[in-house]
Image: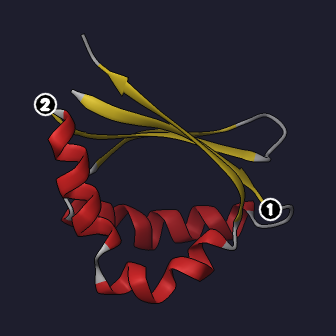
Amino acid sequence: MYAHLRTYTINKGMMEDWINLFNKKIIPLLSEAGIKVESTWINEENSQFIWIRSYGKDKKDIEIKEEKFYGSKWWIENVNMVRSHLAHRDILTIISN
């Protein structure tokens, strides 16, 4: 399975708002695109949001499912608001064995 390990540095004072946005809007949108949120964490300093989202059995699944997610009407209309929460993003592609 292909997945992304994502670490987002959240702008100071925005973690609670980010978590609400993530749970109420982003997870359902990801699910509609066929992307599963496997797990989420927050670092001890409450500054980073770490999560894994999975796609499927091959690399092509990432492209297909992300195109659906990032092409959705809600994402296009809200991308700037969503990204205003983020100071930095690190994304690592991982593969299960």
Residue 50 in the image, given as x and y percentages of width and height: 59, 40
Front-lying residue, 30 or 83? 83
Front-lying residue, 56 or 46? 56
Q: Earlier in the sequence, mark 1 or mark 2?
A: 1
Identified at 42% across, 67% down, the residue is 26
Identified at 21% across, 36% down, the residue is 59
Residue that numbered label 2 is attached to: 57
Q: Is residue 82 above or below residue 8?
A: below
Mark 1: few, some, or many residues within 10 Å (few <14, many ≥20)?
Answer: some
Q: Kindly give the residue lying farthest to the top in the view shown.
A: 97
- Name the element at disc 1: loop
CA–CA distance in space, label 1 to label 2? 34 Å
Residue 34 makes an appearance in the image: no
Q: Which mark is residue 11?
A: 1
Q: Is residue 90 above or below residue 13?
A: above
For residue 56, side relative to residue 54 (left or right): left
Identified at 73% across, 36% down, the residue is 43
Residue 38 in the image, given as x and y percentages of width and height: 36, 38
For residue 5, side relative to residue 83 (left or right): left
Residue 49 in the image, given as x and y percentages of width and height: 64, 46
Identified at 67% across, 71% down, the residue is 17
Task: Identify the amino acid type marked 2.
Answer: Lys
Q: Quadrant of the C terminus?
A: top left
Q: Is residue 55 above or below residue 73?
A: above
Front-lying residue, 48 or 3? 3
Q: Which mark is residue 80?
A: none
